[in-house]
Image (cartoon, grey):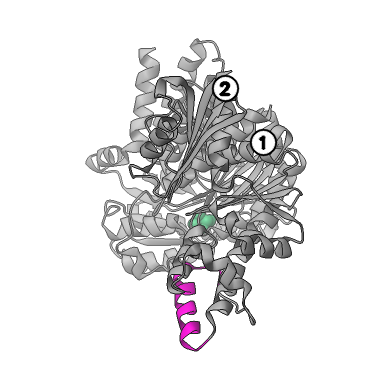
């Protein structure tokens, strides 16, 4: 049986196509998300590349911010449940998940069998989210992927407010204009995001294994600083931003079997 | 069946379109007094022959009230003042404003200046409410309010009228308690939003009429056998569960509201006003008898145990904290009952609500994931 998970985030669309709930046939990431043609394109591409048609897919589950507007799905499940299922598959000992998305950040407690036992979200403010990193990278005139390497070169990390992206933006500009090095500012940015998200995680209680998912977990510096902040090892999800789509495909398989 | 549908739609409509109910009152030339959140002595207003009307804000954007309020005032006071400034409440002969929290204290002062056409009637409850002196003090506050209402209405309010009003209100409370109990057995018919509207409609109607309608609804419901409910059951706590869209989301994800601990709902009717020879004293004593609300001084924080008991007795699968954004009173209580519920292994969802920028999609994700969480738990 073939199933698929479509994770529609605010900035990207991710699809995982799965055979028998075990074998990944294809995975696709398109860097446009909810409200665009991205989700449909990503889904079509994911099945076309492996010579499948919609009829071959027994069940499709949509998840993520745009899950309710994607018409090609049989069911919608939140990204929280899907990330939990996806991470549980990849790291069965997981107890805590940190998911930093484009628009929000979540701390998820995991109970028996990969079920969600607790959750806290910051969905009101861009501070502590992928958006924050994006805005700051733009000011530093670098690609978001290069932020970690730049931050690693810091000599005197500065402190940046983590309560508001707009204030932090002007803070960064004024730091740069007074001669603070870009490396020190980059480290301050990483620290700011981690500080904010670590606060969320501490509220649900840090329990090992701690796994980080979402695109932001590709930033090795964030993982490193998060480990320091939480004083426990933090594992980056092996499938990073595809973890939610994997969880959705697995849940589709389980509900269709 | 038709009778049931008619009753449900009458109550639902009254909650959704309070203006219709109020216009009728204007036509009948009955004076109306606004009662700001959360606790007002409506019985005194009723005894004066006037209609007490609950003012609980509404989903709207702020264009005027921000002249008076900072952005971090709760949206309940912001939207109520906004509607007042737009003239929505001009038909009222006055508005009683309690000072339960810092936001309400400012609200009263602001109202006086921003909505001068609707007379401001302040009310300050005692904090140390269990003392005998507190009862005495509150009685004097109520006595002052009574004089203001007598002046507005142009006639005295007798003790007999007050006692009768208390009786009518206690009867109304009893009826609503019965309704919330019976609603649990009819979760398909009494959806979360209908349950809310049945209760809310009482803020815009004469309590005698409302009691009669709700009693009729209870009788009609009882004619059919209890409904089997396949979904999950939750208890709501907080100040209020609005905007209405969020209650529809509960329905969308198979969550029934089996009990509530909301200031706008059960907290208003779970305790009766003690009846005795001095009706004003009875009303004042009521404040010291009430329990389990963030606005009531309670060093023991018994609310946490009440909430746990409520969840257990109603066989709820979880509790949803409906926290009005920037409501410090509720935020202070949250970690306390969270701990108790966690110890009892009762799942708890924190929902931050806002009548100005409701961010409904984010709320939807939270409600849906909570529904998924408690469904997969068993
Ligand atoms: S919701 Fe909270 S902050 Fe707002 S008026 Fe009520 S008690 Fe005060």
Residue B71 as seen in the image, left or right of residue B32: right
Residue A31 as seen in the image, left or right of residue A189: left
Residue A30 placed where, x, y %?
42, 46
Q: Residue furthest bottom?
A: A178
Q: CA distance from mark 2 to mark 1?
A: 16 Å
Q: How many marks?
A: 2
Sequence-first disc among 2 and 1? 1
**Viewer-proximal residue among B377 and A3:** A3
Q: Secondary structure at mark 2?
A: helix
Q: Secondary structure at mark 1?
A: helix
Residue A158 placed where, x, y %?
60, 79
Mark 2 or 1, closer to the camera:
1
**Viewer-proximal residue among B46 and B336:** B336
**Viewer-proximal residue among A102 and B241:** A102
Q: Residue at x 33, y 52 (%)?
A: B60
> Which corner quadrant holds the N terminus of chain B?
top left
Residue B281 as seen in the image, left or right of residue B30: right
Is disc 1 on the same chain as disc 2?
Answer: yes
Residue B180 image-quadrant placement: top right
Magenta region includes residue A183: no
> Which corner quadrant holds the C terminus of chain B?
top right
Residue identified by numbered label 2: A255
Residue A10 seen from this side: yes
Q: Which residues are magenta?
A: A161-179
Residue identified by numbered label 1: A89
User: What chain letter is assigned to the residue under label 2?
Assistant: A
Residue A116 seen from this side: no
Q: Residues within 10 Å of mark 1 (few under 14, many from 20)?
A: some
Residue B229 image-quadrant placement: top right
Residue A99 placed where, x, y %?
59, 50
């Amino acid at each position: 049986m073939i199933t698929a998970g479509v994770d529609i985030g605010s900035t990207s669309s991710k699809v995982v196509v799965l055979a028998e709930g075990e074998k990944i046939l294809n995975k696709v990431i398109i860097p446009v998300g909810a409200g665009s043609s991205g989700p449909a394109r990503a889904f079509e591409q994911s099945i076309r590349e492996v010579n499948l048609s919609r009829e071959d897919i027994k069940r499709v589950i949509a998840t993520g911010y745009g899950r309710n507007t994607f018409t090609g799905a049989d069911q919608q499940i939140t990204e929280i449940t899907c990330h939990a299922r996806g991470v549980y598959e990849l790291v069965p000992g997981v107890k805590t998940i940190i998911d930093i998305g484009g628009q929000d950040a979540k701390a998820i407690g995991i109970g028996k069998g990969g079920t969600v036992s607790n959750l806290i979200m910051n969905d009101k403010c861009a501070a502590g989210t992928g958006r924050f990193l994006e805005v700051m990278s733009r000011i530093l005139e670098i690609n978001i992927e290069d932020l970690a390497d730049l931050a690693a070169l810091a000599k005197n990390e500065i402190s940046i407010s983590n309560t508001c992206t707009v204030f932090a933006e002007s803070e960064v500009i004024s730091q740069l204009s007074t001669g603070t090095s870009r490396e020190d500012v980059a480290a301050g940015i990483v620290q700011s995001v981690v500080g904010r998200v670590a606060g969320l995680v501490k509220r649900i209680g840090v329990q090992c294994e701690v796994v980080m998912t979402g695109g932001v977990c590709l930033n090795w510096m964030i993982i490193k600083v998060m480990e320091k902040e939480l004083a426990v090892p933090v594992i980056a999800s092996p499938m990073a931003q595809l973890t939610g789509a994997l969880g959705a495909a697995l849940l589709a398989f389980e509900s269709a079997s | 069946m038709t009778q049931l549908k008619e009753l449900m739609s009458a109550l639902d409509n009254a909650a959704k379109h309070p203006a219709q109910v109020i216009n009728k009152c204007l036509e009948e030339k009955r004076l109306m007094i606004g009662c700001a959140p959360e606790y007002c002595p409506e019985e005194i207003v009723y005894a004066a022959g006037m209609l007490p009307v609950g003012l609980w804000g509404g989903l709207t954007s702020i264009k005027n009230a921000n002249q008076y309020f900072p952005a971090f005032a709760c949206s309940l006071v912001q939207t109520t003042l906004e509607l007042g400034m737009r003239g929505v409440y001009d038909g009222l002969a006055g508005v009683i404003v309690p000072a339960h929290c810092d936001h309400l204290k400012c609200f009263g002062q602001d109202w006086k200046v921003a909505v001068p056409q609707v007379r401001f009637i302040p009310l300050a409850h005692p904090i140390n409410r269990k003392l005998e002196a507190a009862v005495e003090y509150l009685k004097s506050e109520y006595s002052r309010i009574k004089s203001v209402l007598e002046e507005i209405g142009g006639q005295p309010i007798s003790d007999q009228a007050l006692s009768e009003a208390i009786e009518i209100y206690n009867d109304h409370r009893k009826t609503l308690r019965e309704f919330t109990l019976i609603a649990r057995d009819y979760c398909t018919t009494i959806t979360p939003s209908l349950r809310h509207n049945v209760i809310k409609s009482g803020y815009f109607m004469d309590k005698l009429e409302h009691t009669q309608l709700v009693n009729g609804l209870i009788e009609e419901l009882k004619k059919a056998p209890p409904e089997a409910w396949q979904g999950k059951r939750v208890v709501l706590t907080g100040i209020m569960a609005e905007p209405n869209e969020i209650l529809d989301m509960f329905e969308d994800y198979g969550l029934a509201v089996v009990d509530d601990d909301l200031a706008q709902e059960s907290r208003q009717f779970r305790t009766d006003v003690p009846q005795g020879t001095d009706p004003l004293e009875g009303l004042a004593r009521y404040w010291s008898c009430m329990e389990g609300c963030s606005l009531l001084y309670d060093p023991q924080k018994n609310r946490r145990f009440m909430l746990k008991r409520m969840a257990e007795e109603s066989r709820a699968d979880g509790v949803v904290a409906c926290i009005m954004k920037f409501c410090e009173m509720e935020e202070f209580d949250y970690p306390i009952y969270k701990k108790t519920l966690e110890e009892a292994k009762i799942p708890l969802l924190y929902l931050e609500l806002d009548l100005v920028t409701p961010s409904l999609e984010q709320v939807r994700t939270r409600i849906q994931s909570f529904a998924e969480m408690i469904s997969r738990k068993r």
